[in-house]
Amino acid sequence: MSPYWWLAIAAVMAVVEIASMGLITIWFVVGGLAAFVAGFVGADLTVQIIVFLVVSIACLALLRPLIIKHRRMGELHEPTPIGQNAVVVERIDNDALTGRVETPDHMTWAALSADGAPIESGTQVRVVEQRSIKLVVERI
């Protein structure tokens, strides 16, 4: 078997990982690349398969928990502006999809009005919800 088949397997696993983002098939990409190297230097098919399985399973068992732990740490420490007061720095108009607020940490965010009514620039508001990169605010 040509070692280039391992590159094809690695590419397929990469596409599956991109689609799922589950941190499962990415380790088979690493295993496929290791098997490609083994085949490229002349190892027979049995050795290539063993290299593929050992490297893939070892990476899955050893590295996945570390990556997941690191990913969760970032989620836990990300501050949320919900409950904070803010100042409208650009008129909020849900229909026109305009509006920005500035939070006490001097961050500006795109904003929506909680009740749908426009809110003028300079108005004090409270953040009641966060939708991705937009804050939903209400007048104080």
Image (cartoon, grey):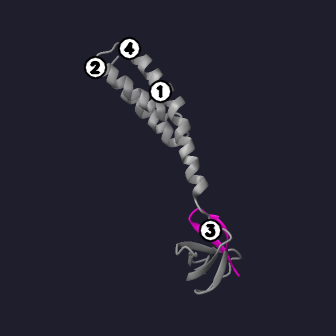
Q: Specify start and end residues of the magenta stretch as a single range.
A: 127-140
Q: State which quarter of the image contains the C terminus.
A: bottom right
Rendering quarter of residue 99: bottom right
In the rendered structure, are the residues bearing label 3 and label 4 in contact, judged by CB atoms less than 8 Å apart? Answer: no
Q: Amino acid at mark 3?
A: Pro
Pointer 1 residue: 56
Q: Residues within 10 Å of mark 1 (few under 14, many from 20)?
A: many
Pointer 4 residue: 45
**Could you tell which of marks 2 and 1 lies nearer the N-terminus?**
2
Q: State which quarter of the image contains the N terminus.
A: top left
**Front-most of 29 and 105?**
105
Q: Amino acid at mark 2?
A: Val
When the figure is inspected, residue 137 is found, relative to residue 47, above or below; the finding is below
Rendering quarter of residue 122: bottom right
Q: Amino acid at mark 4?
A: Leu
* CA distance for labels 4 and 1: 16 Å
Q: Residues within 10 Å of mark 4 (few under 14, many from 20)?
A: some
In the rendered structure, are the residues bearing label 4 and label 2 in contact, judged by CB atoms less than 8 Å apart? Answer: no
Number of the front mark, 1 or 3: 3
**Could you tell which of marks 4 and 1 lies nearer the N-terminus?**
4
* CA distance for labels 2 and 1: 19 Å
**Front-most of 20 and 34?**
34
Pointer 3 residue: 81
Residue at point 50% right, 38% down? 17
Magenta region includes residue 128: yes
Residue 41 marker: 2
**Could you tell which of marks 3 and 4 lies nearer the N-terminus?**
4
x%, y% of residue 51?
41, 20
When the figure is inspected, residue 138 is found, relative to residue 29, above or below; the finding is below
